[in-house]
Image (cartoon, rainbow, N blue to C red):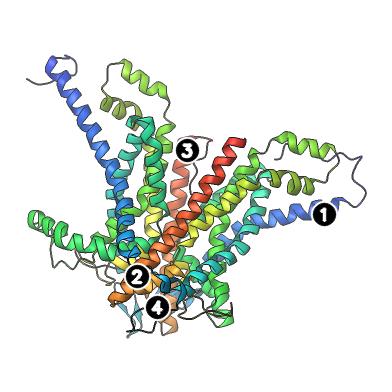
Amino acid sequence: MSTLPSTPSVLPKPGSRAPDIAFKWIAAAAAGLIVVLIVMVGWQLYAGSRLALAKFGPGFLWSSEWDPVLDKYGALPFIFGTLVSSLLALLIAVPLGVATALFLTELAPLRLRQPIVMAIEMLAAVPSVIFGLWGIFVLIPWLRDYLFVWLKHYFGYLPLFQGPIYGVSMMAAGIIVAIMILPIITSISREILRSVPNLQREAAYALGATRWEVLKIAVLSYARRGLFGAAVLGLGRALGETMAVTMVIGNRPQISASLFAPGYTLASVIANEFTEATSDLYLNSLFELGLVLLGVAIMVNIAAQIMLKSMTGSGPIKVN
Amino acid sequence: MAASPYLPTEQFARWRKFKSSAVTAVLVVCALAVIAPLFLVIYFLLVHGASSLDWNFFTQLPKPTGEVGGGMANAIVGTIMLLAMATVVGVPIGVLGGIYLAEYGSDRANDWLRFAADVLNGVPSIVWGMVVYLMLVVPFKTFSAYAGGVALGLMMVPLVMRTTEEVLILVPQSYREAALALGVARWKVIVVIVVRTALKGIATGVIVALARIAGETAPLLFTALGNNFWNHNLKEPIAALPLQIFAYAISPYDDWHRQAWAGALVLMALILALNITVRVLSRDRNTTN
C-alpha cells in the first residue's frame, strides 16, 4: 500500500536497505512481466507470420482459398466460422444467462441460490476437451436425429436450415460454445444485477408494478449497459474456444449459409494443422491466423472491460 | 376491450399479473436449462466412464493402435508433472506480482497492471501454445515437457497475481505498522508477516488457477505434444490426460472411445477434487477471520 509510513530512520543499520530495494525491484519485475508477456505474445505471433504477411498482405483476410497443396492461404472461411459460431453461441447464451441471473438475484428462494450458483461454477470448471467428447458422442447424435430433423421439417424454407444433415456443424459448435460461456455470462450478469440499488426496485413496486414490470423498468433498464458488457466478455471467450469447437464443427474451410453445414474456426484450424504444416508459408499462415485471433480477442476483451468498469464505477467486477 | 395503462381495469390487472407469472415461469425454465448441461455431462461421464475404469487404466501404458486394452498411467502422471512445472513457473511470478500490486504499486500503476492482467487472461489458450512453441520448441528443436509446463505456467500468472493481491489487501494495515515500528525491514514484514498471514488465501488462489489449467488441451498441443510411453526426460514430449482424451475421442476405435470417457472421468474427478479443496480452504478462512 502506498500509504505506509516509511521505515523509521533510527533503526535500520547502514546498508540494510539493500535487500529492501532488491525485493521491491524483484516484485516490480514480476508485475512488469505481465506487460512484457502481452508485448511478447503479440511480437512472437507477428514474427512467426512474417512470410505470410509479406506474401499475402491484407488480402489474406478476405481471401477464401485455403490450399496447402498449392501453398495458397486465405483467412476468410475461418474468420467467418469463428464469428458465426461465436455469435450463435451469444444468441443462445445471453438470454439464458441473463434470465438465470435474474432468477438468482430476484426470484429464487435464498435456500436455492447457493446450490444453483455452485452448479454454475462447476459447469465453468468442466474442461473444453470434456465438452468436446460429450459433444461428439451425446450432443451430436441427438442434434442429428432430433433437433436438426425437426428444424429442417418446420423451418426448412429458411436458408439457415437447409442442406444435408451431418451432425457436425456450425450449429453444434454454437450450442457447445453457448454452454461453455453460460457460466461467465451468468455470473457477471448476476454481479451487475446485484449492484442495482434496491431503491430502484422499491420505487417501482411502490408504483404498483408487477414483478415483471419491476424487472423491466427498474432492474433491466438500469443494468442494460453492464449486461451488454457481460455479453461482450462472453464473446471474447467464445472467439478463442478451441478444443470443443474443433471436435464438433466438422473442420471444413467453407462458407455456407446453412447452420447444418460443417465449418472451421481460426482456433480449430490452428489446433488441427499446426503440427502438420509442411511448408514455411503454411506455418506462417497459421501464425497469421493466430495473430488475427489474438487481435480480435484482445480488442473484444478490452471493450468488455471498459464497459463493465464504467457500469460499476470504481468497484471492479471480478473477471475470472 | 383495449387495455390501457391509464385505466387500470380488472381485466388489465389480470393480464399484467398473468404476464408477470408467465415471465417468472420462463425465468425458472431458463435457470433449469442452464444447469441441465452440467448434469447431462456428469451423467454421461459416469455412465460411459465408470464402466471403463479398471485397474489397468491406472497402471498400464496405451496399447498400440488396434490392440484392445491398455491404460493412461503415463498420461495421469504426465498431467501431474505438467501441473507441478506450471506451479514452479507461474506461482513465484504471480505471487511476487501480487505483492507488488498490494504493497508497493501506486494506484495509477496498479490500474494499468490489473488491466494488463485482465487482457492477458483473455488471450486464447491456443495462442499460448503457439507462442511457447516459438520460444521453447523451435530453439531446442524438440517438443518437451518443459514447454508444456511453461505454457500452462504462463497462463497461471495473471490468475495467481490477482488473487494474491486480493488476499494481501485483506491483511490488516496494523500488522504491517506494528512490525515496521519494531524496526523490521519492509521486505521481511511482507514475507514474514503479510504473506504468512495470507498464506491460506494465496494457496487457495493457486489451487483455483491449477483447477483452471488442469484441463487445458490447446496450449499443450504444440508444446508437450503427447507421448505413448513413460517420459523419463523432461526435454522430451510428455503425455497429458487432456491430450490423450482428445486423441482418443477423435479416433475411429470403440475401445479408444471407451478409454477417452474413462480419462475424462478421471480428469473431471481431479478438477473436482481441486475445487473441493478450495471450498474447504476458503471456508476455514471465513470462519477464522
Q: CA distance from mark 2 to mark 3?
A: 34 Å
**What residue is shown at x 41% (from left), y 24% (from top)?**
A198
For disc 3, the chain is A
Q: Which residue is mark 2?
A: A75
Residue B75 position within the rendered picture, expressed as x and y whole percent measured from the top left: 47, 72
Residue found at the far front of this picture: B55
Q: Hey, what amino acid is under mark 3?
A: Ser
Q: Residues within 10 Å of mark 2 (few under 14, many from 20)?
A: many
Q: Which residue is mark 1?
A: A19
Q: Quadrant of residue A151?
A: bottom left
Q: CA distance from mark 1 to mark 2?
A: 52 Å
Disc 2 on helix, strand or loop? loop
**What residue is shown at x 75% (from left), y 52% (from top)?**
A24
Q: Which residue is mark 3?
A: A310
> Of tags 4 and 3, which is closer to the observer?
4
Tell which circle, 1 or 2, labels the residue nearer the N-terminal end: 1
Q: Which residue is mark 4?
A: B70
Q: Residues within 10 Å of mark 3 (few under 14, many from 20)?
A: some
> Of tags 3 and 1, which is closer to the observer?
1
